[in-house]
Amino acid sequence: MKIPKQFRSFRINKDEDGYHAGVEDISLDDLNEGDVTIRVAWSSVNYKDALAATGKGRILRKFPLTGGIDVAGTVLESKSDRFVKGDPVLTTGCNLSESRDGGYSEFLRLDGNWVVPLPDGLTLREAMGLGTAGFTAALCLWHMEINGQTPAAGPIVVTGASGGVGSIAVDLLTTAGYEVHAISGKLDQWAHLETLGARQCISSKDLYWGEGLLETTRWAGAIDTIGGDMLNGLTRVIQPFGNIASCGMAGGIGLNTSVMPFIIRGINLLGINSALTPMDVRKSIWDRLADQWKPAHLDMIIQNETDLDGLPEVFTTILESKSTGRTVVSINPA
């Protein structure tokens, strides 16, 4: 197909009228350069997307830009020797909707070095149901296992378990053979988390970590999407040589802990940067997500679907902490 002269894109602007965002008709010349042009089929909504589109977080480094840190679609034109017309592809992170145009557009140009071939075992919609959230959850487990984490060591706890990263982590860990415990303040989501595989659900409102620098151990490892006091507490209750994968800061950026858990118990605090993960690791993670780590209940985790016009309402829901699961964005689904 030919790329139309005008097509729809969710653009984020900051100009003399202030910060504003919405659907606009643009042309290919309005987008960043790139050696791979795709017809976008699906995107997704992440917390970072809501911050970027509303201006509540300093995400964008230039204006205007198209929003959306995730994208999946089909190659229309390629100057890259890695792709040909018709290839199904995806990209997550890689500075999309920061310094480059993102996935909330009917067409998009990308740097071929950032593009991942869609692996067998995933549809384009499923890939965006996973998106940055699923990739982050899988990257957490990848780092943990590099550092010796095994199912035999004991249960893994997931914080913020009802959110996008958290719910996928619960399902993914269960699929990978781990016993999973879930921490969530949304009690109405506990039955859903148990369906995804959580053996135990714990209210974040009822947590008491104790006052000691080291407390009685409770878990062999953790995937923490919250940060702040939650992460501080976790460091004191992880078993010797266990791992904490830190991938979120909804609870704050501070960390008030001591060196005791790291020196006396030898635990590992692993920082997770999904946006700038090298391509060889990125491809390996996506291959696992399409195969042995593919969440068994992905269709349940994808709880919402919207189009470009419905994005502002979704952003509001996310920023008010009323969202659950994952939201995919239908752009050119056929």
Image (spheres, rainbow, N blue to C red):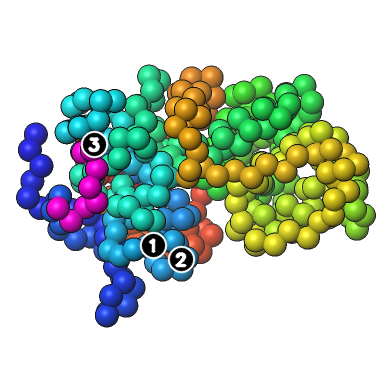
Q: Which of these two is toward me, 86 or 42? A: 86
2 or 1: mark nearer the eye = 1
Q: Amino acid at mark 1?
A: Arg
Categorize mark 2 by other alpha carbons within 10 Å: few (<14), some (14-19), many (20+): few
Horizontal and vertical percent position of residue 245: 67, 41
Q: Amino acid at mark 3?
A: Val
Residue 149 position, x and y percent, is: 72, 28
Q: Which residue is mark 3?
A: 36
Circle 1 residue: 61
The answer to which of marks 2 and 3 sits earlier in the sequence is: 3
Real-space CA distance between mark 2 and mark 1, rounded to the nearest whole angstrom: 8 Å
What's the magenta region? Answer: 29-37
**Residue sitting nearer the eye, 167 or 88:** 88
Say which residue label 2 marks. 58
Determine the residue positioned at 80% across, 47% down. Answer: 235
Between 96 and 24, the one nearer to me in the picture: 96
Dot 3 falls on a residue whose secondary structure is strand
